Structures are given as structure tokens and as C-alpha cells.
Image (tube, grey):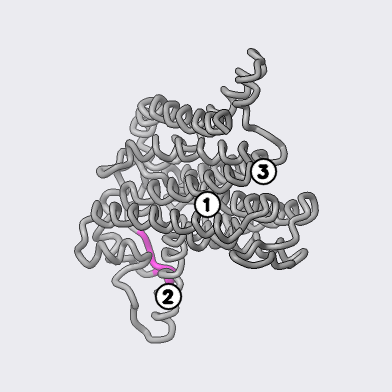
Amino acid sequence: MPTDIIKVLVPAITAFSVGIGITPLVTHYLYRFRVWKIRGGKQTLDGAEATEFNRLHGSLETHTPRMGGIIIWASVLITIVSIGIIAKLVPSAATIKLDFLSRDQTWIPLVTLVIGAGVGFVSDLLDVRWSGQGMRLRTRLPIILVLATVLGWWFWAKLEVISVGIPFGDPVYIGWLIIPLFVAISLSLYASGVIDGIDGLSGGVFASIFASYAIIAFVQAQINLAAFCAAIVGGILAFLWYNIPPARFYMTETGTMALTLTIAVIAFTTDQLGDGVGIAVLPVIGFLLVATVSSNILQIFWKKVYGRKLLRIAPLHHHFEALGWPSHKVTMRYWVLSVMFAFAGVIIAFSGS
């Protein structure tokens, strides 16, 4: 047990240290090459000007760099590669034990993280260089659909995941329906990436989610997966160190796409494969992500059915800003809630599996 704890803590501390170390260099290039939006402001889904958002944040988008998510995934990759190299060059019981890259637990989430980061990076690049609008949604969605379908098929066909754990009950057999379930959850999580809208908000929420799954995986004896989640937490905290208001940079697509898609993989890996309820507790652990997506859906529904907006602005965190809450107050209260929901989800996972 003590060695397992060390195996989880070392990647977290290493990723945090690497993230803190590389941030000045990354920041230098982000500002040097003016990696911010060509045109500030956004439009609503029906093509109209998002007046409330543009009033709150429009001017900030043209001088605050994007692509801050590089700090997160780069620190995780450097940590994984560094520990792996040390284990190979200086093989010993201790160094080999620390190597957490394994085919059965961490390869799939790592590949998902890298692909999400890469696609998001391209979208961000388009946002700051050519189109000024990023990669169009009609382009991003097919990529996510293909990736999620392949991963869902892999869980079903290769890893033989055919059921979903239910808290305080027996697992429910769904067979091949695990594939569309994975796709639906991946799309929903990706849609929640819009929570990256206020300085520091998304970093605190994502850190709580990955920390929760690190604990769940650890209790399930999936130590390599727990170490991987801990490394991501370390990378996010390094990002958050510089993203606390006023933000030095925004996370944007290269961070949110990587993290949201990876959450789906980790939730499934901590379900049947870990004899747990990783999928069922996701709406609890990630409740603020659910609230973010739901607020967008409700806003659209309200405008279509009743001809008026339900919220001053969607998603929900911007609604609170529009009501007059300072952005730092929204961020801090979201952090408090994210810890509370994450704690509740972990308790359910332990007592209900």
C-alpha cells in the first residue's frame, strides 16, 4: 500500500513541477506570436450576436492568449515519458514500480488525451491565425464521433465491457449498446467544455473530477490508472497556478477536448473493468459539467418554445455574471461545489459498488 501511494503521488508532483517549469517558456511564445483571437466576441446558435457575452468578455479575447491547455497535456506527457525512460535506463524495483504506462489501464486514456489535444490544437490554431472561428463544429463532431465509436467498440469487443455498474444494485447488462452509450457520454462531455469561460473556473472543476477518479481507481487497485489521473491533476493545478484571475492564458480547445474525452474513457475503465460504478457516478462527480450542458439545452428549448430566453446568458456561469456576480465569486463558488459533488460521487462509488 505505501508503495502504491508513492506511485500515485510521484506523477502528480512531477507533472505539477513540470507544468510550473514549462509555463514561462510556453507563455513567452504565446505572447510573442500573439496567440489570441483575431476577432473577439461570439454568436448565438441562431447566428445573432451574443450581446451579453460580448459585453462581459468580448474585449478580453483579443489580447489574452489561447492554448493554455498545452501546459496540462505537455506536463502529463513529459511526466510519463520521463518516468518510463528512467525505468528503462536505471532499472530497479523502485523505478520499474513508478512506471505507470500499461496496456491494460493507461494506453487508451493516454491515446485519447493526445488525440483530443491534437484536434483541439488545430482548432485553436485556426482560431488565432486563419479563419478566426476555429475548426467548425460540423468538422469537429465527425472526428469526435469516429473516435468515440472506435473507443466504444474497443471497450465492447476487446475489453468485453457489456454491463454498467449500478450503485447499491447489480450491474445492468446492455451488451453492444455500450458503444452508443460511450458515444453519447463522450459527446455530452465534450459539449461541457464550454465551462472554460471564466478565469480559473474550468481548471478547478476538472481537477476535482480527475482527483475523484484517481481515488476510485486506487481503491479498485487500478494503480496505474490512478497514477495517470493524478498526473493530469498535477498538470491542471500547474495550469491553474497561472490561470487564477487575471488569467495568463485560456485553456481552450486543446485543453478542454483532451480532458473531456479522457474523462469518458476513465469513467468506463472504472466501471465493469474495476468492478465499480464509474459510469453511474459520473453525473454526480461531474455535476457542474451536467449543469453547464443542461443550461445550454434549456436556453435553446425556451427560446424555441416560448420565444424568450430562460437565462440572461447561457451557459449558467455566465448567467451569474450577467446578474452582477464578480467573475472571481462565480469561480470560487464553482470550486466549492465541484469539491462537494466530487466528494459525494466518491462516497457513492465506495458504498454502492
Left/right placement of residue 353 relative to residue 288 reads right
Left/right placement of residue 282 relative to residue 52 reads right
Badge 3 amino acid: Ile
Badge 1 amino acid: Thr
Q: What's the residue at 53%, 28% (across, down)?
A: 79
The N terminus is located in which quarter?
A: top right
Question: Spatial distance from mark 1 to mark 2, Cα to Cα?
Answer: 21 Å
Q: Which residue is mark 3?
A: 108
The magenta stretch is: 42-47
Q: What's the residue at 57%, 51% (across, down)?
A: 261
Q: Which mark is residue 260?
A: 1
> Magenta region's main secondary structure?
loop
Q: Alpha-carbon neighbours of circle 1 within 10 Å: few (<14), some, or many (≥20)?
A: many
Q: Position of residue 203 (x, y in %)?
A: 39, 46
Is 236 contained in the magenta span?
no
- Name the element at disc 3: helix
Q: Which residue is mark 2?
A: 298
